[in-house]
Image (cartoon, rainbow, N blue to C red):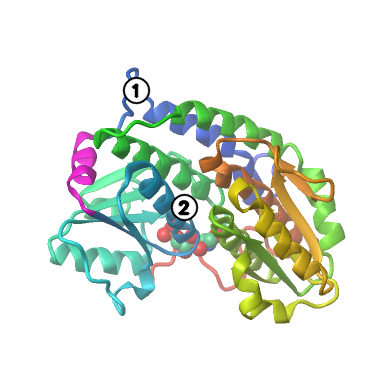
Amino acid sequence: EKGTYPHFMLKEIDEQPFVMRRIIQEYQDDSERLKLDEDIRSAVKACDRIYIIAAGTSYHAGLIGKQFLEKMAGIPVEVHVASEFSYNMPLLSEKPLFVFISQSGETADSRSVLVKIKEMGHPALTITNVPGSTLSREANYTLHLHAGPEIAVASTKAYTAQIAVLAILAVDSARARGLELDFDLMQELAIVANAMEMLTDQKETMDELVRENLGITRNAFFIGRSTDYFVCLEGALKLKEISYIQAEGFAGGELKHGTIALIEEGTPVVALATQENVNDSIRSNVQEVVARGANDIIFSIQGLERDSDAFVVPHVHELLTPLVSAVPMQLLAYYAALHRDCDVDKPRNLAKSVTVE
Ligand code: M6R
């Protein structure tokens, strides 16, 4: 039920801090270890490469998961769009582990890959919000997102839950492989939950920001580098899906290879700047677009902020910044859709779970 909320999407955005806390509760063990199934631990330990298969928002979470698994656990990871996988099946490693990420667990594109790789005899783990779903039943193992039912077509709390659970999987895999990590993930996730609460309290600011910058535009660009780039892909998908503004996410360094030709007087460019190592370079990309007339809207993070930034998210552990930068992106899309009188929860032409290929 929506309760006092005008839309499920807004309710689900607001639920994110609670979802983070529930995930901490569900996956935290009394000892040093995380509460992960021993079978999953063994499967990850045994594999020599992980193949993440997903669609849409879940694919975007997979891109961030790849970074966690590679950086923390040292496992090579490939991320594939489910609908493309069979056309360009990669040469598989000797001991692949397939990880399906799906909020609904019913996405037909992902299921057809699951059927194929099972025929080939490879193990599969499904990360889903619906444990009894098709993808969950047909895989060898399941990790539950614990996000609670997600009703709005635009995925919000499932996306951040996917990122958090992927981080848990990465930390657990690192430990299983005998690697030392210099941070306590559960403690960092608790900090994220508090940060998310501060962000969901800033709805009026986001509403105003949208009114000022996305009022009449037909298009918008999202730019970022490194992890911020992946969050930009998600921010753009969210915006186009519910507000019908043509929105695209780009890697900052790619602008000069074509996209910058599209920048006109007043084109909104949302730039994400939450990563220290790319802060200077993304800001110089912003200058390049501003010099061509763009209207820059910079989202940065405490510690890296500058006076001209439009919005600053609270500081969290560098690996977990997508969990906080996603929230203003979601609110941006929400208010843009609201201002345009769009059907926020049920955008045209879209279904909550896509059960056809
Ligand atoms: O249920 P799934 O996670 O498998 O769904 C995948 C996509 O259809 C889904 O994430 C879609 O992109 C969302 N509507 C985006 O908000």
Of the 4 image quadrants, the one containing the N terminus is top right
- Near mark 2 (Cα within 10 A), the count class, few <14, some 14-19 or many ≥20, is many
Magenta segment includes 274? no
Dot 2 amino acid type: Ile
Horizontal arrangement in the rendering, residue 291 relative to residue 96 (left or right): right
Q: Residue at x 34, y 23 (%)?
A: 29
Horizontal arrangement in the rendering, residue 158 relative to residue 249 (left or right): left
Q: Residue at x 37, y 30 (%)?
A: 27
Tag 2 or tag 1, which sits nearer the N-term?
Answer: 1
Badge 2 residue CB within 8 Å of ligand 1: no
The magenta segment is 37-48
Q: Residue at x 74, y 63 (%)?
A: 286
Front of the two marks 1 and 2? 2
Q: Position of residue 212 (x, y in %)?
A: 87, 59
Q: Position of residue 93 (x, y in %)?
A: 20, 62
Q: Which mark is residue 64?
A: 2
Of the 4 image quadrants, the one containing the C terminus is bottom left
Q: Which mark is residue 29?
A: 1
Magenta stretch, main secondary structure, is helix
Tell me if residue 49 can be seen: yes
Quarter assignment of residue 323: top right
Q: Is residue 242 above or below residue 356?
A: above
Who is closer to the viewer here, 137 or 42? 42
